Amino acid sequence: MKLTTLFASAAVALGLATTAMAEDKTKVGFVFVGPIGDGGWTYEHNKGREAVEAEFGDKVETVYVENVAEGPDAERVMTQMALDGADLIFTTSFGYMDATNNVAAKFPKVKFEHATGYKRLHPNVSTYSARFYEGRAIQGHIAGNMTKSNIIGYIASFPIPEVIRGINSAYIHAAKVNPDVEFKIIWVYTWFDPAKEADAAKALIEQGADVVLQHTDSTAPQAAAQEAGNVVTFGQASDMGQYAPFPRVSSIIDDWAPYYIARTRAVMDGTWESMDTWDGIGPGMVGIGEISDAVPAEVKEEALAMKAALADGSYHAFTGPLNKQDGSAWLAEGETADDGTLAGMNFYVEGITGEIPQ
């Protein structure tokens, strides 16, 4: 009887210990706008999730839902994650901004991190993004040097400040080295739709573009350019190195892993605070993929020098003199754009034709 009681007590104790260990595990959720195999934006965010698992091992549990539409569905997914015990939830698309804040209000003990947004309406919400426009400056420099038709195509997702900044930065630096350059922009109103992205790339190529940049997430534009031949492209969000050394001659790489690890650790040790993070090439959140030998050596050297200057802060991608599209003065000689203007950018710079959709 005593032995049975002893075993029973041990079993209870073991059960309690196992429960305590499970309770000690930090649960981290990720809401993804595309599939984890998109080869671009969501692929890189998922690499960040995997880095959290590798860093913390059995101290964390990560969960994710992919292909979550921006809108009511996102709010439903976030709510379910919170109900299922998530301690920290990363919501990884601009269109999740209102949903993130709505759900955060209902779950004040859960920490929420919203990518590329600006609303922090509650003390349990943080925002984070990367200065992708720094990478666009390097792409613009290469593109302006490599185009022979002087027509550069740009596949744009949604007319939000992040995308408009990228277009402006790429154009400014392409025009610096090639004043005859012309940008043709197609808005596809999607982050990930390979068919739409391929159609946009083909349409731009038919309009004479021999360089195509994209702010969408699939590799479809790379494949369309490869099929067309003699069309230069750049990887978006991830390296897309399977298309190197041509048509993909370089890339912007989003490295979210250090941020995700740091913010998970902050939840674990109780130091998490609501904040806004906007990092670029210097801190490593924006990486520049290898510049292939398809780029002339002198242009490659100049691009790497620009990368170094952007990283150490000796150069700013938006440095005057610059005018707005309507010819009105924006930045004087040597003046640089402030973060507030960049964060809310809703205008093209002088030289870009066409209107920003409303």
Image (tube, rainbow, N blue to C red):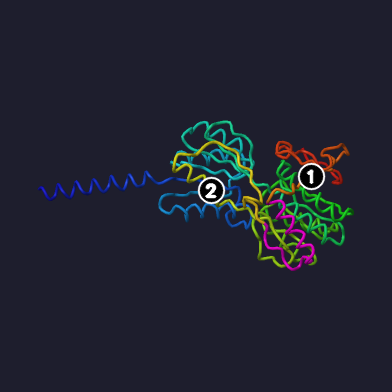
Image coordinates of residue 352 in percent, x first then y, are 84, 46
**Mark 2, residue position:** 260
Foreground residue among 344 and 34: 344
Image coordinates of residue 181 in percent, x first then y, are 86, 54
**Mark 1, residue position:** 319
Image coordinates of residue 1 in percent, x first then y, are 10, 48
Is residue 193 part of the magenta span, yes or no? Answer: no
Q: Quadrant of residue 84?
A: top left
The magenta-colored residue range is 288-311
Give the residue type at disc 2.
Tyr
Foreground residue among 204 and 266: 266
* 10 Å crowding of disc 2: few (<14), some (14-19), many (20+): many
Image point (80%, 54%), residue name: 153
* 10 Å crowding of disc 1: few (<14), some (14-19), many (20+): some
Image point (66%, 51%), residue name: 281
> Extreme left residue here?
1
For the residue labelled by badge 1, is the local secondary structure a helix, a strand or a loop? Answer: loop
Q: Main SS type for the magenta part?
A: helix
Give the residue type at disc 1.
Thr
- 150 over 61 or under it: above or below: below
For the residue labelled by badge 2, is the local secondary structure a helix, a strand or a loop? Answer: helix
Which of pointers 1 and 2 lies earlier in the amino acid sequence?
A: 2
User: In which quadrant is the C terminus drawn?
Assistant: top right
Image coordinates of residue 260 in percent, x first then y, are 53, 48
